[in-house]
Amino acid sequence: MRIFKIIGGGLRALFGKQRAEQELDEELRGYTETVVEQKMRAGVARGEAERETRLEMGGLEALKEQVRGVGWETTVESFLHDARFALRMLRKNPSFSSVAVLALALGIGANTAMFSVIEAVLLRPLPYRNAGEIVRVASTWVRNGTMTSYSSSPPDFFDWRDQSRSFSSMFAYYMNEVALTGQGQAQRLRTVMATAGIFSTLQAEPTLGREFSMEENRKGANHVVILSHALWQVAFGGAPEVIGRTMQLDSEPYIIIGVMPADFRFPLSSADAYLPVGFDDQVMTQRGAHYLAVLGRLKGGVTVAQANSDLGAIMAQLRKLYPDKDGKWDVRAEPWSAALVSNVRPALLVLLGAVGLVALIACANISNLLLARATVRHRELAMRRALGAGRSRLVRQMLTEGLLLALLAGAASLLLAHWVLVSIVRFGPADIPRLASVGLHAPVLAFTMGVSGACALLFALLPALRSSASEASSLLRTSASGARETARLRGALLVAEVALSMMLLAGAGLLVRSFVGLRALSPGFDSNGLLTMSIGVPDAHYKNSAALQSYWEETLAQLRRLPGVVAVAAVTPLPLSGDDFSSSFSIEGRRVPEKDQPSAEVRAATADYFRTMAIPLRQGRAFTEADRLGAERVLLISDAAARMFFPQGDAIGQKVRLGAKVDTKKMKERLSASSAMCTISVLTCRPLPLSTCLLRSRGWMP
Amino acid sequence: MATVGKPGVVPGTLDMLILKTLALEPMHGYGVGQRIEQISKGVFQVNAGSLFPALRRLERQGWIDGEWRATENNRRAKYYKVSDAGRQQLESEAREWQMQSAAIARILAATSGEV
């Protein structure tokens, strides 16, 4: 209660200033008159009594000042006074002010922009209820002491889900693309293929309809779909009777069972629809097929470490039961928010450090300018000192000037940061989660204020202390030793500035060198004039390989007829796209135990692939139009593979058996990991349903 | 700003003395000074330079409340009275002071035999 009175009294004094002044005036006048009257009553003449009273009371103005000095509001008042004075000083030196504000705005703006990114990507909680409880569970593989996380296989996931006691729910998913047809123009949808439990783990419910059931994760029962709010609006005009209707996905009917809320995003880059994975009866035998991402929600009070030891025990059991498939795998749970950003976090923090240095350099710069100006303001300060201003009063005045400068710069920096953020969102890398949601939000503004304040302290304190240091008398004389000391200080600041700049320049130089080095690295093909285009072909339409082959032949022939196109080919997966498919293989005539078989990255491509990519042939022949279904299967291997497995140079004509059947269905599910990875490209000539078309153009294609 | 020749109050006790005086009866600034001088039999004199800042301080702390009223000789004056919080403050300050002054008195009265 008392605190309110103290604050209230101060506020009344600040805003009802005139009234308070009047009251004080009246009170003191009354007091004076009473004293005079008393003296006259004792027999002193009026004039003499008044004189005595004045002597006793001291100056009336000084007394008032003393009374006003009680309470916090005078500090505010003197600050406002300082601020007004500082503003006048800044206006009087427009060139100094604009240079200082501009330099600082650059420094602070870089920090604001960088912090906005960090706030959006690293600090902001994920958009799910109790998001802190969600952990990512990944299969891990330790090689040469470094642990790498991979997707998980369905049997491993089921065992974790059913045997662990640390999770209230767990689900697995992978991303897919399907074609929506039968509603005007065909449309490609980004879909999440998930197991039941996805929405209970994320603690989100459909606004309409229901979520998946366990039974719908069986092949054949999985033709149901939950729409995102956006797709519901676009494709169905937001009609509530959409539940129970069917839609054609990849030419097969799917029943719409639910619609998610508008603010629901999963994954963070959002998807158009959610479908249940349809596992077939053989699913439990596919322990080596790692293609599922797994998320779980921890039970209340369970720590990540406890979950890890729980999962670790289960995995140890699985390693014993399935030494072939699980022998080298382990499992690791980590908070999802951390797992999402683990690869960008260090880079962002390094960048924040770098822009922090930029701000420091700006501060050193301004500090130097202020010190130079202090020599000019020498007389003004000396005069104020002589008139009775204390040192702390002068320091406060100069700090206020600094703060005003920094706040102006902070405001200007927001403009700069806004432009930077717009271009970061437009041109920034696509694989940083939530980068699109950066903006000048409240925490960012608070950060900018804080940085501005800290900058003000940094750059203004030294000049303030320096120029208010000596006594008034010596300030009035221009002292040679003082000037020398200021010069020394400025020199030191300059050295610090140059040192910081050198650090930044060296860092930036190294970065540019690495970048140039990366650019100079040849990917093995000529990417100039090469265009890519993704096509998904629904299974239901092209039921057998012959139909698929004729589809591709026709499509490629049509593309080849486009003006400007020199060569056309289809390939899957596209090199350097991040998608890959590996398979173990054996070479005929060499006996290797199954679990020690080498494995290789495999691509399937059409006849003209090498000409389209401009990949030179070292030995043998490239594919021809004759290499088609029914003909003898052929493959090409990379240079590196030839050197590694056929060091005598006798690769041509050898027979290789690929372990996992390069089967269209599995390719579509993007099996990605296998038991012993080495990156060797093996190419087979076969058409597949999901391919990337490559077009080599003459000059520029519109 | 102390007036030459006239003793001020013991440093740090002015607030307590004002509170005590006002606890006896609400009063204006001049009256407070007079009353302290009277009760102390002229030992303590409070000049305006310490009195008014002290009154402002006590008012801000919420220990006394001011109110404009007419004086006995028909002049408007600001009368101060002690609030409940002020009364508590006075009690604790008085207790503290009595303990301290008793201790000081014991020390001053000590003879070499007692040590």
Image (cartoon, rainbow, N blue to C red):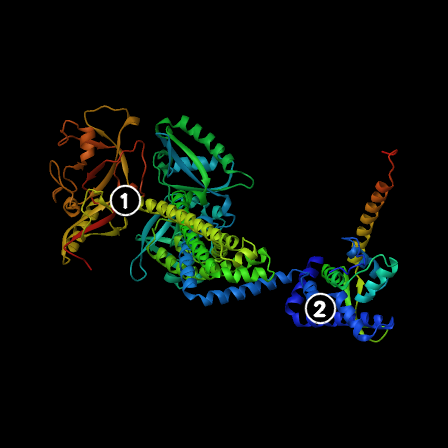
Number of numbered tags placed on the structure image: 2
Name which residue type carries label 2: Leu
Q: Quadrant of the C terminus of chain A?
A: bottom left
Q: Is residue A610 left or right of residue A387?
A: left
Q: Is residue A67 left or right of residue B112?
A: left
Res A260 label = none
Residue under label 1? A513
Looking at the image, residue A171 lies above or below residue B10: above
**Local crowd at mark 1 within 10 Å, few (<14), some, or many (≥20)?**
few
Residue under label 2? A60
Check the residue under mark 1 and report the chain it is in.
Answer: A
Report if residue A221 is visible in the image: no
Q: Is residue A69 left or right of residue A453?
A: right
Report if residue B104 is visible in the image: yes
The x and y percentages for residue A414 are 43, 60
- Same-chain status of marks 1 and 2: yes
Name which residue type carries label 1: Arg
The x and y percentages for residue A278 are 37, 44
Instruction: Give the SS element for disc 1.
Output: helix
Front residue of this view, candidates A70 and A447: A70
Instruction: Give the SS element for disc 2.
Output: helix
Looking at the image, residue A658 lies above or below residue A545: above
The x and y percentages for residue A560 are 14, 54
Quarter-wise, where is residue A323 in the image? top left
